[in-house]
Image (cartoon, rainbow, N blue to C red):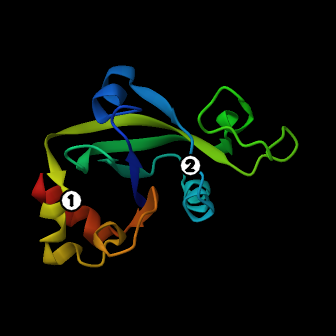
Amino acid sequence: MAYWLMKSEPDELSISDLEKLGKARWDGVRNYQARNFLRAMAVGDEFFFYHSSCPEPGIAGIGRITEAAYPDPTALDNESHYFDAKASEAKNPWSAIDVAHVETFPKVLGLGYLKQQASLEQLPLVQKGSRLSVMPVTAGQWAAVLALR
C-alpha cells in the first residue's frame, strides 16, 4: 500500500463533508504531476486529507482510495469550474478517483506545526515551493504524522 497527501479547499470538500457522504469523487486536479500521482494510486491506498486555502490549513484526517483513476468528467462539463476546452470524450487528459472517509482527526494538524517536526522535514508539503495538490508520503512520514494526532 502507498500513502499520499491530497489537498482540498474545505468550502469545496472538507473532511467533515467526506465523513457525512461516506465517499466522494476527487476531481478537478489540473496539474500534470499531481494528475500522474492520482493515476499511480491503487484501491486501498490511504491519504492524508489536507485542508488548503483556508484560515487553518493542515491535515484534517485520513481517506482511502476506493476506485482507481478514470477520466475526470468535470473537464468536459462547461458549467464546471474545472472545465477544459481542450478535453474531449476521446482525449481527456485529466483524471479523477473515488475516495472514502477513514478518520477525522480531533484537531487539524496545522502547517506551521508540521513544519516544526524534524521527522517531516523531507515531506514535500513542508518544503519551500511545493504547491502540488497531490503528493506521495513515505511510510516513515505517515507514521510520524499519525503520532501527532
Residue extending farthest to the right is: 90
The answer to whether 28 is drawn above or below residue 144 in the figure is above
Quarter of the image that includes the N terminus: bottom left
Residue 78 position in % (x across, y down)? 72, 29
Viewer-proximal residue, 63 or 30? 30
- Residue 68, visible in the rendered structure: no
Disc 2, SS: loop
Q: Residue at x 78, y 46 (%)?
A: 92
Q: Position of residue 77 (x, y in %)?
A: 71, 29
x, y percent for residue 15: 30, 35
Amino acid at pointer 2: Val
Mark drawn on residue 29: 2
Describe residue 102's horizontal placement relative to residue 43 as left or right. left
User: What residue is drawn where x is 32% and y is 68%?
Assistant: 139
Mark 1 residue element: helix
Front residue (pair 75, 16) = 75
* Mark 1 crowdedness (10 Å alpha carbons): few <14, some 14-19, many ≥20: some
Residue 54 is drawn in which quadrant? top left
Q: Which residue is mark 1?
A: 111
